[in-house]
Image (cartoon, rainbow, N blue to C red):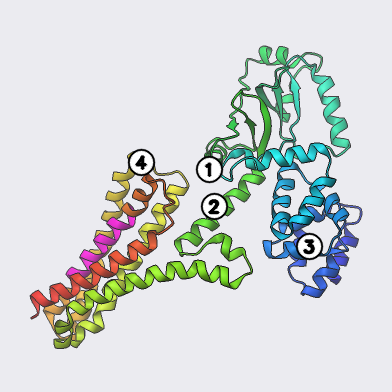
């Protein structure tokens, strides 16, 4: 609490950063948190709430009156307003309704527009606040207007000036640094024609998949991208800070999916809800484990006749599982980054099989020698070496093909890949090892 008071006092005349305040709040106890919320200036409390993990949001809401929440929402940019209102509806629909009714008509229209888009569409992530000018306007007049808006804090994070026709159709995007080179006494149209430069921007359609927009930022090194509707009219923009958040969310979702957990459920404080989601994948894992045990049971007589097989058997499955996980992780991540196309699938499969065979040969020799010296049986070393080579080959092959096939079926490659791969490496590992032992040693 004292740290927050000290921070607020020392930055009274400067700029308060919501992320810094959020870091301090996360260190407080529940009682201190409730008191600390009341100390934060209402003009930034909305930004602070969005910086905090979801589990803190309801505590922020409970600490504020409806009028205070309304004021907090009014201070946010349109995309953050929409996000705040969505979280507020999940906490208390009645309060959310009251806050919405208290907002200005323009804010209500912006929130309604953004909520009309699906979660995967670019329009759901855009800001409606854009600084525009028409091609016939004089540069100095626009600069004066921009200066006035900036001084009154009506504009934030302006990177580009968007030039449109009279009816709002997007024509050009001019960086503020390029704007300084223009003749301020001429119109934008005259300046652009005289410069000979191409100012046509990379643009995103409002219904376009946000993953494609993320790729635009990566490929073209963008700081902002205009969003247009089907008629080409400018309706908003997406900035790089929003893209960073999206990339982080996608990476988190991918990690959770690979581990067989649901990212939304894990953010929820309800133990039962998160437990149910995890139980689904644990149940599938149980079935695969039973299948592997059935394979082992088929060779019960072989195991009874040679105890060494039971000692060495887990090594084959473990090496195959780890090798497959390495391949799976690499391929899933490259698919997420857009580094692999469908036409590139054959190259990736060949590469991963090559790596797996190389490592399989190396560790097959090492483990074969260890098994030979350990149990003083040369042929046992041959059995485990051949089995390990087979299993690592299958791990590389399926570790690459499973996510590629799921991607082709329009299924998230991270979902289910681990369970399928574990089944393959366990079954192939046990079957090849025990099968070869039955043929060669008995």
Magenta region includes residue 390? yes
Who comes first in sequence, dot 3 or dot 1? 3
Distance Cα–Cα, label 2 vs label 1: 9 Å
Specify the quadrant that holds the N terminus: bottom right
- Quick one: label 4, few (<14), some, or many (20+) residues within 10 Å? few
Specify the quadrant that holds the C terminus: bottom left
Who comes first in sequence, dot 2 or dot 3? 3
Distance Cα–Cα, label 2 vs label 3: 26 Å
Asked whether, in this view, residue 150 is left or right of residue 415, the answer is right
Asked whether, in this view, residue 77 is left or right of residue 215, the answer is right
- Mark 2 = which residue? 250
Which label lies toward us, 4 or 3?
A: 3
Q: Which mark is residue 60?
A: 3
Who comes first in sequence, dot 1 or dot 4? 1
Q: Are marks 2 and 1 in contact (CB under 8 Å)?
A: yes
Q: Residue at x 68, y 65 (%)?
A: 55
The segment highlighted magenta reads 385-400
Who comes first in sequence, dot 4 or dot 3? 3
Asked whether, in this view, residue 363 is left or right of residue 222, the answer is left
Q: Position of residue 398 (x, y in %)?
A: 30, 57
Distance Cα–Cα, label 4 vs label 3: 47 Å
- Mark 1 = which residue? 211
Main SS, magenta region, reads helix
Distance Cα–Cα, label 2 vs label 4: 21 Å
Q: Quadrant of residue 339?
A: top left
Q: Position of residue 348 (x, y in %)?
A: 32, 48
* Callout 4: SS: helix
* Callout 2: SS: helix
Who comes first in sequence, dot 2 or dot 1? 1
């Amino acid at each position: 609490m004292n740290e927050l008071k000290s921070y607020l006092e020392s930055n009274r005349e400067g700029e308060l950063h919501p992320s810094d305040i959020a870091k301090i709040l996360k260190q407080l106890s529940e009682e201190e948190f409730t008191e600390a919320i009341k100390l934060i200036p209402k003009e930034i409390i909305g930004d602070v709430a969005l910086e905090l993990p979801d589990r803190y949001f309801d505590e922020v809401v409970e600490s504020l009156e409806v009028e205070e929440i309304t004021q907090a929402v009014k201070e946010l940019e349109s995309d953050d307003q929409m996000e705040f209102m969505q979280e507020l509806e999940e906490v208390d629909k009645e309060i959310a309704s009251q806050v919405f009714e208290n907002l200005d008509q323009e804010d209500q229209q912006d929130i309604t527009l953004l909520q009309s888009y699906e979660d995967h569409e670019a329009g759901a992530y855009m800001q409606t606040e854009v600084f525009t000018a028409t091609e016939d306007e004089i540069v100095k007049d626009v600069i004066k207007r921009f200066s006035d808006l900036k001084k009154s804090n009506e504009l934030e994070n302006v990177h580009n000036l968007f030039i449109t026709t009279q009816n709002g159709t997007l024509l050009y995007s001019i960086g503020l640094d390029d704007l300084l080179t223009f003749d301020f006494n001429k119109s934008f149209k005259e300046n652009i024609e005289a410069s000979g430069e191409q100012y046509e921007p990379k643009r995103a359609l409002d219904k376009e998949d946000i993953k494609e927009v993320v790729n635009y930022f990566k490929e073209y090194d963008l700081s902002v991208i205009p969003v247009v509707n089907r008629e080409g009219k400018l309706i908003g923009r997406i900035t790089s800070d929003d893209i960073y958040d999206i990339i982080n969310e996608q990476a988190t979702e991918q990690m959770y999916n690979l581990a067989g957990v649901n990212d939304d459920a894990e953010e929820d404080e309800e133990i039962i809800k998160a437990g149910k989601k995890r139980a689904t994948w644990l149940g599938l894992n149980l079935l695969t484990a039973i299948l592997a045990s059935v394979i082992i049971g088929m060779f019960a007589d072989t195991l009874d006749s040679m105890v060494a097989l039971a000692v060495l058997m887990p090594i084959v499955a473990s090496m195959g599982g780890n090798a497959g996980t390495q391949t799976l992780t690499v391929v899933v991540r490259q698919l997420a980054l857009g580094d692999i196309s469908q036409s590139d699938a054959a190259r990736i499969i060949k590469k991963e099989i090559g790596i797996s065979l190389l490592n399989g040969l190396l560790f097959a020799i090492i483990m074969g020698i260890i098994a030979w010296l350990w149990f003083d049986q040369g042929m046992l070393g041959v059995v485990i070496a051949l089995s390990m080579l087979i299993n690592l080959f299958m791990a590389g092959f399926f570790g690459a093909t499973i996510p590629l096939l799921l991607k082709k079926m329009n299924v998230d490659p991270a979902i289910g890949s681990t369970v399928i791969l574990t089944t393959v490496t366990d079954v192939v590992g046990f079957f090849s090892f025990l099968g070869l032992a039955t043929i060669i040693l008995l």
